[in-house]
Image (cartoon, rainbow, N blue to C red):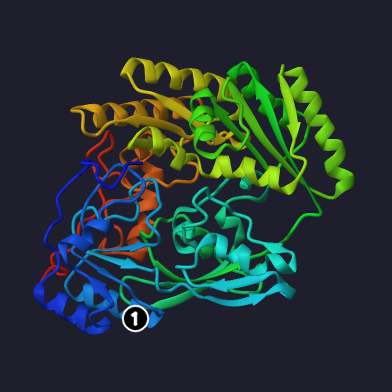
Amino acid sequence: MSSPSSEANIGESAETLPPKARERLKALLGPRGYLDRAADLTLYEYDGSVDKVRPEMVMFPRTTEEVVEIVKITGDYGVPIVGRGAGTGLSGGSIPRAGGVIIGFSRMNRILKIDLANERAVVQPGVVNLDITLAVQAQGYFYAPDPSSQRACTIGGNVSENAGGPHTLAYGVTTNHVIGLEVVLPDGSVFRTGDEEPDLPGYDLTGLLTGSEGTMALVTKIVLRLMRQPETVKTILAIYDSVDDCADTVAEITACAITPVAVEMLDREMLAMVEEATHAGYPRDAAAVLLIELEGLREAVEPQTEQIREVCNRCHAREFRIAKTAEERDLLWKGRKNAFGAVGRVSPFYYVQDGVVPRSQIAGTLRKIGDVGKRHGLTIGNIFHAGDGNMHPIILFDARKGGDLEKAKSAGEEILSHCIAVGGSITGEHGVGMEKNEMMGRLFSVETLNAIQSFKTLFDPNNRLNPGKVLPTGKGCLEIRQQPLSAASRAY
């Protein structure tokens, strides 16, 4: 992640938008429905990753019908399009590879229907994640997936990236809470997958499109599952003088057949930054801590809390705290959820990675991350979803120093290569985007990548939707290329 002033460009904007197409798009939404001045477009040339490419135009539709017309006009001229929510993504998924048009969904931000009797909500893609819970919490419900950016990120972006969050250890990621979608295809046709009724027969197109990173369709409506708030919540802070002991505790908890709703780990570097910024009560002198949360019926949560206390003591925790009030619990989570902002107080530029390892490999991976940081002369802090092995090393660098960005990227690649080597993955919730697509060849066989590409081609034969994302482009170790726009589609 970097500040907007980062010079981490990966390319210049290409000229893909002919004057006639620009005129038609302006006429469609009117003067307040688009941006095309250079100063305005600068705000849309980056997301939460380190790459920057400027679009040629940003459109702000309010309805599915307007999305359809944008898709049809750009299709007449072969112009690539990229869907964008709040731009909080961390893999370059919501910025173009080269020019083109961004469709910003920020004005499609209505909660269309809340059906508590059937535990459903129907929303537009621009609805902010947290706003769904705020709309139903007074009635005793909530929406489970909770990315750290949930106060800003949108449901459309969450669906695109299959976002997770701390509490998805027990509840699952976004795909486990999406029941149906309305989507627009590159030819302007609209279709629906799933519905408000569960378990419809046929292929799981909802599951296929959730996590496809906007490369196959544009999502214009989402049917979500709501959940009842738990009867009892216990939030625990376990404090350690050894990173290895802290990491070993995670595997021990799993061995006891206990599944907390969240198990988060912060190391010494992150604890200092978080506590300085939020004063949430985290110890600055600890090697690491676990933030553990249990939810459910009181009769189940109380004994599980004591079992976890025993596990933490066996793994040499120096202190075991239970939040006594809702305010204490909220403060601990404030520290966790505002961690990225806390890092920004220390370093104006940082690069967030998103590898996954088996729980048994957490301690070894943390040692590897430390070694990588030392070799590259970089500070790397760790704050991550320890319960499912989803590592988030945060690499601090200074883009104003020659070669520093390259060192950060190299360090990130080494860490992800290690994740693959120990049986993990290159992403758990941030997506592949254009940050990690060249590493897909290390994770999947050619046959698997060809199968993935066949789905992309089926939905988007001219490669107009978010081109150059997810699949390798041929620049890396695997010579599989996404098909370019056809000559016919470029016949302006």
Amino acid residing under circle 1: Glu
Query: Residue sitting at 22 percent across and 63 percent down?
Result: 40
Asked if residue 300 shows in the view, the reply is yes
Query: Residue sitting at 69 percent across and 47 percent down?
Result: 327
Pick whichever, 481 or 14, lies toward us.
Answer: 14
Q: In the rendered view, would you say 7 is above or below 42? A: above
x and y, in percent, of residue 42 in the image:
22, 56
Query: Residue sitting at 53 percent across and 50 percent down?
Result: 147
x and y, in percent, of residue 324 in the image:
77, 41
x and y, in percent, of residue 384 in the image:
54, 35
Local crowd size for mark 1, using a 10 Å CA cut-off: few (<14), some (14–19), many (≥20): some
Asked if residue 198 shows in the view, the reply is no
Instruction: Specify whether 423 is left or right of 349.
Output: right
User: Residue 199, located in which quarter of the rendered image?
Assistant: bottom right
Numbered disc 1: secondary structure = helix
Determine which residue is flagged by label 1: 66
Q: In the rendered view, would you say 230 is above or below 6? A: below
Instruction: Specify whether 467 is left or right of 226.
Output: left
In which quadrant of the rendered image does the N terminus lie?
top left
x and y, in percent, of residue 289 in the image:
62, 27
In which quadrant of the rendered image does the C terminus lie?
bottom left
